[in-house]
Amino acid sequence: MPWLAIPFSDSETRNRLDELFKVRGIPHCVILDEEGKVVSDNGVEIIREYGIEAYPFTQQKVKDLKDQEEAARKNQSLRSILVSSSRDFVISSDGKKVPVSELEGKTVGLYFSLFSYKACDAFTPKLDEVYEKLKAKGENFEIVLIPLEEDEESFNQGFKSLRWFALPVKDKSCQKLARYFELATLPTLVIIGPDGKTLQSNVAEAIDEHGILAYPFTPERFTELAEVEKAKQEAQTLESILVSGDQDFVIGKDGVKIPVTDLVGKNILLYFSAHWCPPCCAFLPKLMDAYHKIKAKDDAFEVIFISSDKDQASFDEFFSGMPWLALPFGDPRKASLSRTFKVRGIPLLVAIGPSGKTVTKEARDIIMTHGADAYPFTDERLKEIEAQIEELAKGWPEKLKHKLHEEHELVLARRRIYTCDGCGEGGHVWSYYCDKCDFDLHPKCALKEDKGANDDSKGEENPHEGWNCDGETCFKV
């Protein structure tokens, strides 16, 4: 770092500053003016958004920048987007400078990408294929690469085989455009219409799914594609999503091939997961518990593991501890399934009903909250559970005081998952909760004391079955 620091040994000053500026997370940047007064405690966000342009980082300066961006959006043109004070051209892969004026009146895709990023590396050939097909048909379409690379050699290596245009690597406009278009993910392909206005904020997913059919990227075309997608979902069967040519099987233990036809008519969970993913490893025991409980009651149920592991050995190790089926490692059907169910993160658990249609993509959250009781994960079953939950809380006080948390009243609240600050056990659905202190008590812990304190006729406390509460903590018997 090129600046100054509080000595690491001076913990007293560091702690005092943490308290003074209410630091609850890092990075945290407080900006002071010449007199030592706080200009902003949101310095991280300001610098990420505007960089050096925001100096001296005052509220007025940030407001001026926001006003300038808003004005630019209202008067947006291809020139206002791509031309800077020092540059009025884009470059081709052979190094030629092409005036931005030559792109005006065309549909232009601004492609935000990193050649070194895996998702971009996979998408770029697909985009190039669509580009070549559109050019062959004589369409008035161009792509301008907005490189986010810092390494010029890496950029040149990736760009040299493409017929598109690009902004120069490290051009200041690259970061400015990323901010202007509120870049949130990579790859992103922003579509600018022939009038210079933004037509679509990101069509990367549409191109990935529909290829050239997504062109000309108009709202009307996207409505048509949505209808096609809807019809596809309504016609979905287990075979339509799991069978591709000769790949008409999944595998069990020791690589035994199980025909997809053997699974037709069953309730299926597609489990997108990986050995290297901590949330996946944390969720796995919960899923296994639900699997065994459901399987004991209904054999027409199965889970299929769809791996994002890095290599065969990692897949084998992870799958060896699972009691269900899997798609073979490296199977190309995984990419198709990821597109179909729009997998953006793992673990993801998709429930497929006996008809082969999607029941829900939220099966992970449902199992985390309700476990095997939620089977078969339909809306009807969830409504039944919801009614049972509401019935359970009837007669419970909405608020109460408890000796474990005398500072504030505890309020009966719906909590997805929590750890009881009384007994230390996990809980879900209902909690007596203090929002200010993030304090939870199981209803069985909170109500036990409340009942004992107000029921003189009982004398000794009558513990809830399986629990023993000593007034400070509830322990499992």
Image: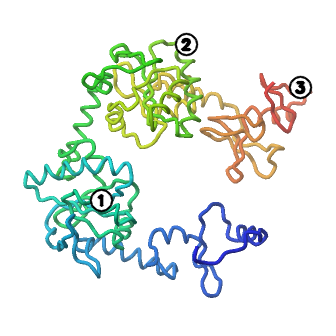
Q: Could you say where residue 55 lies in the image, as x and y percent from the top left?
A: 49, 81
Q: Which mark is residue 458?
A: 3
Residue at 31% x, 74% y is 72
Residue furthest to the right in view is 459
Q: Which mark is residue 157?
A: 1
Q: Quadrant of the N terminus?
A: bottom right
Identified by mark 3, the residue type is Lys
Q: The residue tagged with tag 2: helix, strand or loop?
A: helix
Q: Nearer the viewer, residue 135 or 140?
A: 135
Q: CA distance from mark 1 to mark 2?
A: 56 Å
User: Neighbour class for label 2 at 10 Å: few (<14), some, many (≥20)?
Assistant: few
Q: Nearer the viewer, residue 317 or 4?
A: 317
| Residue marked by disc 2 | 296
Q: The residue tagged with tag 1: helix, strand or loop?
A: helix
Residue at 51% x, 67% y is 45
Q: Could you say where residue 326 lies in the image, as x and y percent from the top left?
A: 43, 24
Identified by mark 1, the residue type is Gln
Residue at 59% x, 23% y is 289
